[in-house]
Each structure stands twice: as structure tokens, then as C-alpha cells.
Amino acid sequence: MKLFSGTPLSQFGDREKARAKSSPAKLESDREKIARAQLPEPPASRLSLRVVPLQRLAAGGRWRVEAMRSLSEPVLLWFARGQGRITVGGLTRGYGSHNAVFIPAGTMHGFEIGSQSFGTAIFFGSDPGLELPAKSFHLRIREVAAQNELAGLVDNVQREIDSGKPGAERAARHHLGLLGVWLERHVEEIAASERKPDAARRLARRYAEMIERDFRSGKGVGEYARDLGVTPTHLTRVCNQTCGRSASDLLRDRVLYEARMLLSETRLPVSRVSQMLGFTSPAYFTRAFQHRTGKTPTAFRRLG
């Protein structure tokens, strides 16, 4: 199975002309709508923290987990069974059974999910009030005792969320605190054993961070490369080395995810979605979107 398959979007057009058509107040209103158009919270609980089966995350389409995106809250992915690839911050690794991947808020990521992939996503909420790792990490948990310990912590959080008893949220947060301590201890083990990231991995991470910050601006790969102090050719070579994808494909995948979210989760006109994502015109956006997905934006919004 090929991760993030599809024909790349065409390059962006003259974004300055598109920006000139909107007032600052209207653009600010649209930015607020974008912020609300992130991955919808599953209806399993009224609490800000959630424990969601991995398969359920892709219920509205595999693009919801496979495309490059970020969340406004930290998340821990616990892969109990299955295997595939996960890209976090411009670095791709394989995952297998009993792997845990922690992703801080605002970190660009995407992962494969197949029919044999089972596990859980623990969403900590936008203001968890916990001491959590500042950087992403990937744990391959080989010891059965450690596997059972993590599974037990996750089960305890889920049990309190589902109980509906008085104080359930407070109790769940206490269990999350213990989970935070578990993560902290294992991060220390990783820091002691992993080598310092090389120049290629550092550059890929910086590029991923810049994409997440600026992907709505319409900047092209050449501009990102210039800001990073490298040539576009070198940036693409590094991205191919660290995640098996070109620099332009990472950027376009992130933009396409946002386009899909805006089309499926808001009622913004296609023309506004086009403008907000840096395209020259709605017609150009429609051609590019259809080239990648096989559907026009209007058809995608109607059919999903």
C-alpha cells in the first residue's frame, strides 16, 4: 500500500492578486473558521480528553489520518496490532505492534492505517494541564510488562470517561497524569539511547514546521528553501531521504488536507476556500483539486 498516493497538485499561482480581493476583516473571520475546521472531535464524550479507536479516526475517509495535518492538542497513538508507516515532522518510520507515538500540538503528521491496524488515540485536550514532552517520539515497546502497563493506563482513562460518574473528568485526568509520568520516564530512556539527529533530519523537521506555520500563504518550495538557506534541489533530496517524499509533495499534501477539511466541515464557498489556500482563482483550485482527488470540490463536499 502506497502512503499518500495520488498525483501532486499543480504549483500555486499569484497569491497576491487573490489576497487583494479580500478585506482584512473577512480574512480574519476565515482564519477563525479554519481554526474550527480541524479534525472533528469524536462524539464519544463531552470531555475535552478522549480515547478513540484508530479505525474510527478514518471513518470519514482514510485521508483524515493519511494526509499531512496537525492538531491543536497533544495526542498519543498506541498501535496494539498491525504495521505501516507514520510521518511526523518530516520524518517517516515504520510502526508495528506495541508501538507508541507521541505527537505534540501543532506537529505535522500522517500515518497509514490498514484493515489489520488496531489501537487507540489518546487526545489530551487543548489545555491538558499536564507536563508532557515538548517533542515527538516513537517508542517500540518490546517488554510485555511495559506493554501491559501502558495498556492499563489507557484503559483506566477510558473507563472513567465512559462511567459518567461524578468526578469522572477529574479522575480521568489523574490517570492521564500517571500516563504523562510513564511517557516522561520512557522519553528519558530514548534520550539516553538515541543518537543526535543528523543535518538531514534537522532540516526536514524545520521544513515541516515551516509548512505547518505557512501553508495557507501560498508559498512555493523555492521560497521555503530560500528561507531555510538551501536550494530547492537540496531540500527535495533531504525530504526524499527522510520520508521518501519530495518537498513539494509534503507541501501539497498539507494544503489538500486543509482543503478537504474546509469543504467537508464548513459551508464556506469554494471560492473562499480557494482564496484562503493561496490559489489564483476558484477555477484553478477546482482543476488542481480534481487532478489530485478525482472529484471536483463541489462533488467532494456532496459525496465525501
Image: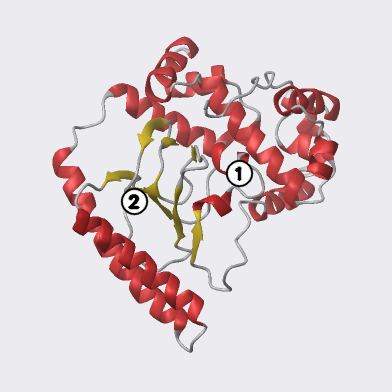
Horizontal side of residue 203 vs 121, given as left or right: left
The secondary structure type at the circle numbered 2 is loop
* Viewer-proximal residue among 209 and 139: 139
Q: In this rendered view, identify the residue nearer to me: 235 or 114.
A: 114
Residue at 22%, 47% (x, y): give it. 142
Q: Residues within 10 Å of mark 1 (few under 14, many from 20)?
A: some
Mark nearer the viewer, 1 or 2: 1
Asked if residue 27 is positioned above or below residue 227 in the image, the reply reads below
Return the x and y of residue 141 as percentages of the image width and height.
25, 48
- Quarter of the image where one finds residue 278: top right
Alpha-carbon neighbours of circle 2 within 10 Å: few (<14), some, or many (≥20)?
A: few
User: Which residue is tagged 2?
Assistant: 134
- Vertical placement of 128 versus 205: above or below? below
Give the residue at mark 1: 64
Q: Residue furthest bottom?
A: 166
Q: x%, y% of residue 262?
A: 72, 45
Q: Quadrant of residue 302?
A: top right
